[in-house]
Amino acid sequence: MFNKSIIILAAGAGTRMKSKLPKVLHKISGKAMLYYSIKEALELSDDVTVVLFHQASKVKAEMEKYFTGINYVIQDHENYPGTGGAVMGITPKYDQVLVLNGDMPLIQSSELKKFDLDATIVMSVLELESADGYGRVIIESGSVKKIVEQKDANSEELRVTTANAGIYQFDTKFLLENLPKLSNDNAQAEYYITDLIEMAITQGKVLKPLAVNEENFKGVNSKVELADAEVIHQNRLKHEFLKAGVIMRLPDTIYIEEGVTIVGESILENGVTLLGNAKIINSHIKTNSIVEDSIIEDSDVGPMARIRPGSNLNGTHIGNFVETKKALLTGVKAGHLSYLGDCEIDEGTNIGCGTITCNYDGINKYKTIIGKNVFVGSDTQFVAPVTISDNTLIGAGSTVTQDVKDGQLYTTRAKKRTVEGYFYKHFENKN
């Protein structure tokens, strides 16, 4: 049962990222940072509002690829800049509202559930060995009594190691009553959500600190921090797959994107990359192979193979330097150095080294269909569209430009020719 509303702040440009891309759209394990904030928020609430401003339409369009039912609002940045201004004009559905940041991709719903404390404001804090660089949170008798920025702290306050983690849960009534009281009378001329803390203290409200895991509340403001966060997220993903029975060789060398599914006792060797919505079922993906948006079942792939989007391999062997794209392969052997694109190949068929499906004429893509028990010799080109029936032989070096019927041998090799002494005549003429 949902009991709180959630507001996610995602309006900033993120200048420290040094990028034209909005900060919240920079990716962690294949998904934009904001994706993770929304995903975890939806575990707790059916009333999720995302506050946008910088390149708002681009951010919204990206999130709409994954989520429906999200409320998007545009911050009145000209008149009400700052974190306090970002939450103005929003009417939450529930009596409690949790305010998150869109640049915290490591946040987890299990941690957010801990904000359910009886207080006007629940404020996340970090217990650090050194709080240098952070705003300090002064706690007395289990309640927040003061927050102070480092530059404003006295010597005693500087010794405090409790820091503000930047996530707050507000009583909705208090929030709506006090937002209009915020002032931008400060050096940045912005409205700060942290000023609500001081208002609540002045009004004698109950403010509870919630000590949170620093890793989960890690903010990302630069590409260095982005890379650090991705390492943490990758380790989380791989840890869950390992617990589920997946075998990984040198896990630190493996890259797995959010959305990948691995079923059964699959094996991932070192250097493997799994992208998009790849699904691996009881299969062996060998060293330095890439699988993207494809299904691999009861098969082995690689080493150094590339399975491009739309491929579906079942009971199939794909060897080194083989590339597939939109390929439906069932019970096929393709050992090495082949390109199989826009094709269907049935069981018992052997694809010789150097085979290519010529699927593109510069304007349109065409399909190659190869039946059962077909033996394809090395260095064969199938010029699509073409259909190869069951139980056929394709001679090595052939260029197949027509359908081949059941039982046929197809070959386009030129007639053998030898010229005695030609080597000597050729080079003597060059001198």
Image: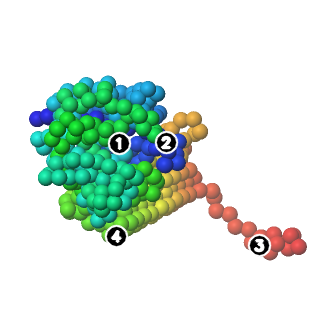
Quadrant the C terminus occupies: bottom right
Query: Which residue appears at 46% of the width and 44% of the height?
Result: 14
Q: Is residue 342 above or below residue 425?
A: above
In the image, residue 103 above or below residue 64: below
Q: Which callout, 2 or 4, points to the residue nearer the camera? A: 2
Residue placed under numbered mark 2 in the picture: 21
Q: Earlier in the sequence, mark 1 or mark 4?
A: 1
Task: Using residue 39 as the reference point, say whether residue 363 is left or right of it.
Answer: right
**Vertical placement of 303 versus 120: above or below?**
below
Name the one closer to the observer, 167 or 294: 167
Q: 10 Å neighbourhood of mark 3: few (<14), some, or many (≥20)?
A: few
The location of residue 258, given as percent across then percent down, is 32, 50
Is mark 1 in CB contact (under 8 Å) with mark 4? no
Whether residue 329 is visible: no
- Residue 27, position as x, y percentages in the image: 41, 48
In the image, which disc is placed on residue 102?
1
Q: Earlier in the sequence, mark 4 or mark 3?
A: 4
Q: Residues within 10 Å of mark 2 (few under 14, many from 20)?
A: some
Question: Label 4 sits on what residue type?
Answer: Leu
